[in-house]
Amino acid sequence: MIRKVFVLLSLVLALPMPLAFGASADTLDDLLAETQKARAAEAAENKKREADFLSSRDRQKALLDEAQAKHNAAQARSESLSKQFDANEVTLADLETKLKAREGNLGELFGVTRQVAGDTAAIMYNSLTSAQFRGRDEFFTKMAKSKVLPTIPEFEQLAFELLREITETGRVTRWKTEIVAAGGEKETTDVVRIGGFIANTGDRYLDYNPKLGTFSVFARQPASKLRAAAEELSEAKSGYTAAYVDPSRGVLLAIYTQRPNVLERIQKGESVGYVIIMVGLIGLVCSIYQAGYLFMVQRRVTHQLQHLDRPMRDNPLGRVLATFRGDAQSL
């Protein structure tokens, strides 16, 4: 009996505390039944917990497998990218070598382009064609001072401007533009340009001012012969006509227009010049008188040659003949 009570007490102590202290049993059979019931409930709970654990384990395994698959995929992609990176490094090194070689060619081309642009800028600045096509010298100056490689459109514009300058310097062109008259006022008129050498409007020759980019009328115009040729050229519509060309692009014409005329030369001579002119006039009168006298003597000598038998004193030959013959009456 004591042994049974001890076993029952052991079972009671083995039960969970809420069940042990919360159960109400009047007899040992009821206590045994409650105990079995508690054990069954605990077994069911353990089974459920085991099932939840197994389910959680399966989910964790699935997540682990998925993470491992992603890791393997990432590892494979990393190896692929590493191989691609190494290949790109080799390609990049090859391209850098080619780039340096081509940069050398482009650098030489750039140097030549800057030199051509710098040399051409001064030509375009002073060219008569710039009065018709303005702003070209600014483009060449900018390209000559540039620190970067020119673009393809800039190369194309450079070639175009050079070809246009070559074409225009070999062409006679007429266009309407604004010029500065001799008095300083501006007027719009037709200008005729012969290549890059000389320009005129009507019978007036024009001087190109690079700073203003316009033509101005020479304050002093050349001789009437040159002005007549300029007017004939301005009025010509077709065919051929004579014209004067200044190969120095206006420099010689500017010097020629500064030549003083006869009256200005006399005025610059002052009193000495007037004395020289007076002496010259006296000498001219004397020479005219002497020429007339010699002409009359020549006529009388010719007449005497026709009448050698009758010497006359109005000519040297007649007086010589009369003296030789001793003819007192003829003397």
Image (cartoon, rainbow, N blue to C red):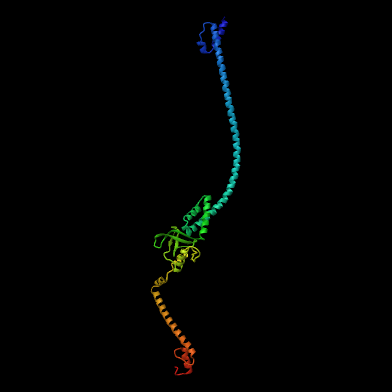
Is 236 above or below relative to 94? below
Count of number-bearing discs: 0
The residue at the point 41 percent across, 76 percent down is 277
Instruction: Give left or right: position of 267 versus 125.
Output: left
Which corner quadrant of the image does residue 294 belong to? bottom left
Quadrant into which the N terminus falls? top right
| Residue ranking furthest to the front | 238
The residue at the point 55 percent across, 14 percent down is 42
Tell me where residue 92 appears, x and y as whole percent.
Answer: 59, 43
Is 237 above or below relative to 277? above
| Residue ranking furthest to the left | 271
Tell me where residue 284 appears, x and y as whole percent.
Answer: 42, 79
Tell me where residue 34 appears, x and y as whole percent.
Answer: 54, 9
Res. 149 in view:
no
Is 226 above or below relative to 322? above
In the foreground, 98 or 128: 128
| Residue ranking furthest to the top | 1
Which corner quadrant of the image does residue 290 belong to? bottom left
Instruction: Give left or right: position of 184 versus 114.
Output: left
Is 3 above or below relative to 148? above
Res. 139 in view:
yes
In the foreground, 54 or 127: 127
Quadrant into which the C terminus falls? bottom left
In the foreground, 165 or 233: 233
Instruction: Give left or right: position of 41 versus 176.
Output: right
